Amino acid sequence: MIIKRRFDPLKVLSYVQGELLLALIAAAAAYVLHRWEPLVALPFSIAATLGGALAIFIGFRNNSAYGRWWEARTLWGGIVNSTRVLARLIITFTDSHTHQPNYDRARSEAFKREMVHKVIAWAHALRIHLRGERDWSSMMALMPAEERSAVDAAANKPNVVMQLIGQRIYRAMADGTLGGFDSFQMEGQLLALANYQGGCERIKNTPLLRQYHFFTRLFMQVFIVLVPFCLVADLERMGIGWVVVPVALIISFVFAIIGKVGEVNEDPFEGRITDVPLSALCNTIERDLRELLGETELPAKLQPVDGYLD
């Protein structure tokens, strides 16, 4: 996620270099052809009409793309909250049975640590799953050794981790670590996490309507090519026909950047600098949940690097 307010102009230009190259070629061609044959010109109303149609497509696409990005961020905000609640329930319910005759302090402490670490592992697994990454070490290190092979063999690893959390809750009820009704509230939080995961997977696996993407790009290219032909005649009458090149580049740059803003926000889980900062959110979850356990050696808080938060 971009944190800084100022951008590197060269990095911005790299996003629209294809559109600017097309604009440069079209503007140079319009200037040369009009000098050779003055009839090679178009009325400005054509560019105005096409620009209006293009603005409608870009506006819809950008609104839809921002809606997807913000929904993704909202879902992960819910994940942060639900993991905190689930960890609190695990710890408080386990500690509430100290008065029971079958209470085993070592067993209860091991259960709390294992369960909270599994919740952290689930968050890391979902991050890696959504980004399509291959390094699962940060998640596997938090899982019990005897369960790592089952998780490693799974296609949907966060789903399997969730199942293992549920199974562990009921084993704890069987051995007296938890009481008979403790699972009800924990299951509610597991359901919430499952719904958040489903929402994230829906965004990941359902692209924005491809027809809007295709026609926006097509209209953009047609607009960039026609703009200099609609400007060159008026500029030549003013004796500054060569200005069509920088003017066309500026107009094309503005429209191309507006279009790219929506394009890069369509898919918020790709690990790009414009995406939802999943690594930072998982870092927050891990720090908060380890702190609830009473651990003092917490992972360092993830900080922005060069104005970007991963």
Image (spheres, rainbow, N blue to C red):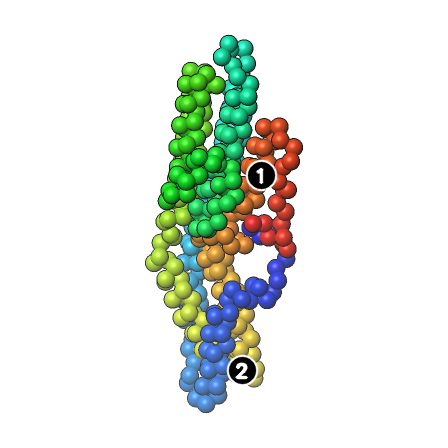
Instruction: State the mark number for residue 188.
Output: none
Residue at point 50% right, 52% down? 271
In the displayed structure, 102 sits above or below 287; it is above
Residue positioned 49% across, 41% down in the render:
139
Are there few (<14), some (14-19), or many (20+) residues within 10 Å of tag 1?
A: some
Where does the image place residue 72, in percent across and percent down from the top left?
Answer: 46, 44
Residue 13: give x, y in percent of width and height: 55, 67
* Type of amino acid at the residue the image marks with label 1: Thr
The residue where tag 2 is placed is 241
Q: Secondary structure at mark 1?
A: helix
Drawn side of residue 44 relative to residue 288, left or right? left
Percent position of residue 96, x then y: 53, 16
Residue, disc 1: 284
Left or right relative to 306: residue 149:
left
Residue closer to the observer: 41 or 5: 5
Q: Give the residue furthest to the front.
A: 146
Of the image marks 2 and 1, the number of the one nearer the N terminus: 2
Q: Is residue 165 above or below residue 8?
A: above
Marks 2 and 1 sit apart, C-alpha to C-alpha, by 57 Å
Q: Amino acid at mark 2?
A: Gly
